[in-house]
Image (cartoon, coloured by chain):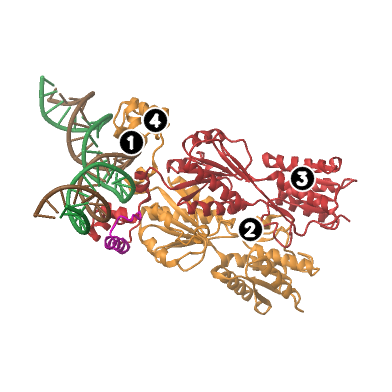
Chain colours: A red, B orange, C green, D brown
Amino acid sequence: MRPPTIRDVAERAGVSKSLVSLVLRGSDQVRPEKREAVLRAAQELGYRPNAAARSLSEQRTRTVGVLLNDLRNPWFVDLLDGLNSLLHAGGLQMLLADARLNRRIGQDPADPLLDLRVDGLVVVGTLPDPAALGAVAERMPVVLAGAREPVPAGVDQVAGDDEQGARLVTEHLIGLGHRRIAHLAGYGAVGELRRRSFEATMRAHGLADRAVVETGDMTEEGGYRATVRLLSRPDRPTAVFAVNDITCVGALSAAEELGLRVPHDVSVVGYDNTSISRLRHLWLTTVDNAGHEVGRRAARFLLDRFERPGGEGRIHLAAPTLEIRGTTGRPS
Amino acid sequence: MRPPTIRDVAERAGVSKSLVSLVLRGSDQVRPEKREAVLRAAQELGYRPNAAARSLSEQRTRTVGVLLNDLRNPWFVDLLDGLNSLLHAGGLQMLLADARLNRRIGQDPADPLLDLRVDGLVVVGTLPDPAALGAVAERMPVVLAGAREPVPAGVDQVAGDDEQGARLVTEHLIGLGHRRIAHLAGYGAVGELRRRSFEATMRAHGLADRAVVETGDMTEEGGYRATVRLLSRPDRPTAVFAVNDITCVGALSAAEELGLRVPHDVSVVGYDNTSISRLRHLWLTTVDNAGHEVGRRAARFLLDRFERPGGEGRIHLAAPTLEIRGTTGRPS
DNA sequence: GCAAGGTTCTGGAACGGTCCAAAGAGGGGC
DNA sequence: GCCCCTCTTTGGACCGTTCCAGAACCTTGC
């Protein structure tokens, strides 16, 4: 009762296994009647190719591993979507692995993917282990998507352009007439880039001395507390640019609790265009990170490297867009 | 420059390939010095077993496929976590595939998993194609997790106990003193179960004629509109039980927009304990679906079937818990 | 010193495909 | 009718493992 093999199909169709293989791989060197006989036999037997056998023989798996470090981050889904669309067009499968799930178990999260001999690797989000990744990159194409970090040589990188995003936000607020603007900063490479770009943009508009930066921890609670501090100052800012949506929700709570109306008394802006920001109850002005485009670009890089292996690591920054919703307006 | 094989290791250690295989699979029929020599050689060469070759030879992959139909649903992550912990303990890998990503491409989302000859399949969420699943279930263990649907014979099923969850909510509200209670119903098997249990519980407490049911579409917008209708009635309910958190957020918006304070003027309850419900800005009372437990149980069922194949499909309902937060209180 | 019996090790046959060199079939030209 | 050439088809080697039967080696007992 084992699943049928290519040989079973061959026998039923009255041909050799080689011919079956030829037909199934779509060769045009086969007489039509034989082709049909083979196809019919395969159909009748419910034949399915065995991926293990195929990849053993072909020395490639037509599969790329995708290492996620946090399935909970909904932004990744857009990215995966973009990634998948292009990879599929290139005849490649995507294999997902969640680093966080496996980390706890105490093994390198990429191990299962490497044992499966994936043809390439996409790491989504913060790097688990830069050193290990360098070794992997010597054997197969590797792309880092959705994070801004120093990467080992030969690794491509795709991410949203955080500097541009932060500039869009800051200029939007300045354009509305805000002058005293606060930034709730985050940590990591991304937090750093957004903060610096905020400061640079303020400076470029001659508002360097009106910029305030409070450091948070990228949580709602952190955003709440930082905003309470900010809005209790005598020279309280009229606008708050939070490093991400979740921090922004904290800022919103704080403003309301202090009796300030948004956006009438204070404007707030988030970052990431998460589903939370789209709740009509919150309706946050935020930045969309172009996740789909990042995913497509990562796939592009990978496909390029399959064709021409080696070469320098490249970097692509996808252009973010501003989503203006209900939490920003002119200062009163 | 191909990756080293078991033969390379054998040569370097001065033994046969069979002995290497024996050592690597942890046999105790090997003299310690040989074992060490093999292990050292493997280490030095950076040997990694080839999963394709192994599964071809062993006729099993030690891998179970997990078919998700919506990566965006954060509840699944808890479920995966529970699933993974037990599967890993059983020496099994998890392979994720997102049905939604692949559906668009127009192929059966389970196909890649079947070609890989996974040893078992976990379908998370609503069934893609019940008929196809029946055929699959004849060849390998299949478990449906996190959805309540009629399944083909021989398929196990694990889900949260929606009836119990809805009862917990309803009795919580009744216990607080509410009498006129509305339910924002949803669709599908889950929506049906929650609604019926709400009605049954109201009846059991002699409140059948105070129960109101509005049908929504499980979106924020739907929840908003239904709640506006409800709260504009002359005999407006003092509590609203929404079929899920997102609908509940819509209800919350509606209440606020009508100038009603929550929970002072009206209590609202969600379902699913999503991250949204935990935002301090919303702080919804809701029901936790015990995702982790559902995942563990699904793994248990799968492991059982590996040991004793065949038999009836079983069903397990995990007990949900009530998360009482800020949106419920005594009626005024 | 040798047979018996246990332990340790090995060669070869799977597993289910792909690939390649070569065989077979068919057609055309002389 | 024969030779040559092209188009189809085939058998066998190979991919990297596991598994198994049996070989080689050690003890042990007499």
Name the quadrant of the N terminus of chain A. Answer: bottom left
- Of the residues tagged 3 and 2, which is closer to the observer? 3
Sequence order check, earlier mark of 2 and 1: 1
The amino acid at mark 3 is: Leu
Which chain is indicated by disc 3? Answer: A
Return the residue at label 2. B273
Which chain is indicated by disc 4? Answer: B
Which chain is indicated by disc 1? Answer: B
Residue B21, numbered label: 1
| Magenta residues, start to end | A25-44
Asked which secondary structure carries label 2, the reply is: loop
Q: Main secondary structure of the magenta part?
A: helix
Asked which secondary structure carries label 1, the reply is: helix
Name the quadrant of the C terminus of chain A. Answer: bottom right
Asked whether the residues under the numbered discs 2 and 1 touch, taking CB atoms below 8 Å apart as contact, a structural biologist would say: no
Which chain is indicated by disc 2? Answer: B
Find residue B130 and report its image quarter. bottom left
**Residue at left offset 31%, top offset 53%:** A22
Asked whether the residues under the numbered discs 3 and 2 touch, taking CB atoms below 8 Å apart as contact, a structural biologist would say: no
